[in-house]
Amino acid sequence: MHMPLETVGRPLCSILVKVEGKKKYSENHARMLSLLKEPLSIAMSNALEHREILKLKELLVDDNRFLHRQLLQISGEQIIGADYGLKKVLNMVRQVAAHDSPVLLLGETGVGKDVIANAIHYSSSRSNGPFVSVNCGAIPDSLIDSELFGHEKGAFTGALFQKRGRFERANKGTIFLDEIGELPLQAQVRLLRVLQSKEIERVGGTKTISLDIRIIAATNRNLQEMVTTKQFREDLWFRLDVFPIWIPPLRERKSDIPALLQHFINLKSRELKLPRIPVLAQGAIDPLMKYDWPGNIRELANVVERALITNDDGPLDFKNVQLRGVNLTNTEQNKNPDGLNKVISAHIQQVLAKTNGKVHGPGGAAELLEINPNTLRNRMDKLGIAYGKK
């Protein structure tokens, strides 16, 4: 005997009752089985709805956990220089925030592209949606597709469960693709599809997933040159280069250094759990204004932290702080770009000697210098420092 179960015209499942032999069932048996149709349909409907609720609850917990990590990374960040060095940038942010157009943030490493991306998102109509940040240069090539687009259970060895990628997590919000120039060509093709159709497919899946997202990309590399050398897809570059925003390096906005300095003193004092916020020694800011800051705002934050660690309860100064082999009190050296290049070159070679020539990976020169491996290689090319494929 076969009895389909349904609720409000929606098929649920079927009940099949079987016995050996022929003509074993009577009309009475069928009537008795039919009495179970309504309670079994209700029970099955409730079970399916409960399973759906559990699934949604797991997704919510997963999203909350993920977004909590994101918020920890961006909390406490604010834009210093909105009235001075970054005034033009903030005007452009206000212009583009109200629209869903892709934005391409350009600038050297450490200028604060992630902070500007946050400003665009939280000034837009998507501010109540998720803001998902991805460092494209930090994800291994073999995992980039799974990390961005997700995967189905069993899609590859080790895929023990279904995973939603960063694009799905950013639905109804904004995804920030930092270091977009590091994205491998295979992933660039899939990203192009997202920009064109706002659709993705998980790795190992066939279902098309529609998305409502805004894309903000950032790079410290010259994408136009990368297009010429076939390292970056021209069609993808055209799609991303709708509204480029150049973020000036710190050496071009030195008027912001006093405010940035006080901001990092307050922030780092809290992080280091210092009993009090130290005051600046007289003239302490002078050498900071004369240094060219090749590491930009990130380097300034590190300088403040090192000074706070070595400060012995007195007024804060930077006399004992060494930057890439340059003493901040040596103003004449800071004024000489050629001399600075020589010092930087010597420092890089010294670090390479420690790593036996290793540039990339754990324990490599890039890790010790706290910069992207490709950025280090570019710097070494300009300085004429030879290196292998390490």
Image: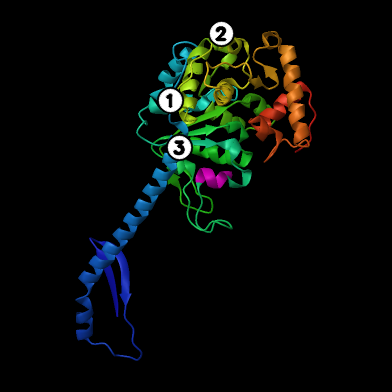
What residue does disc 3 label?
A: 70
Residue 35 x %, y %: 19, 76
| Label annotation for residue 283 | 2
In terms of secondary structure, where does tag 3 sit? helix
Mark 3 vs 1: CB contact within 8 A: no
The answer for how far apart the CA atoms under marks 2 and 3 are is 38 Å
Left or right? Give the position of 189 relative to 100: right
| Label annotation for residue 2 | none
> Which residues are the magenta region?
144-149
Is 145 magenta? The answer is yes
* Amino acid at the residue labelled 2: Gly
Residue 268 x %, y %: 49, 26
* Amino acid at the residue labelled 3: Gln
Residue 337 x %, y %: 71, 12
Looking at the image, tell me whether mark 3 or mark 1 is earlier in sequence order: 3
Residue in the picture at 51% in, 58% down: 160
Residue in the picture at 64% in, 19% down: 320
Q: Nearer the viewer, mark 1 or mark 2?
A: 2
The answer for how far apart the CA atoms under marks 1 and 2 are is 37 Å
In terms of secondary structure, where does tag 2 sit? loop
Residue in the picture at 75% in, 22% down: 345
- Pick the front one: 264 or 35: 264
What residue does disc 1 label?
A: 120
Helix, strand or loop: magenta stretch: helix
Looking at the image, tell me whether mark 2 or mark 3 is earlier in sequence order: 3
Q: Quadrant of the N terminus?
A: bottom left
Left or right? Give the position of 152 relative to 20: right
The answer for how far apart the CA atoms under marks 3 and 1 are is 16 Å
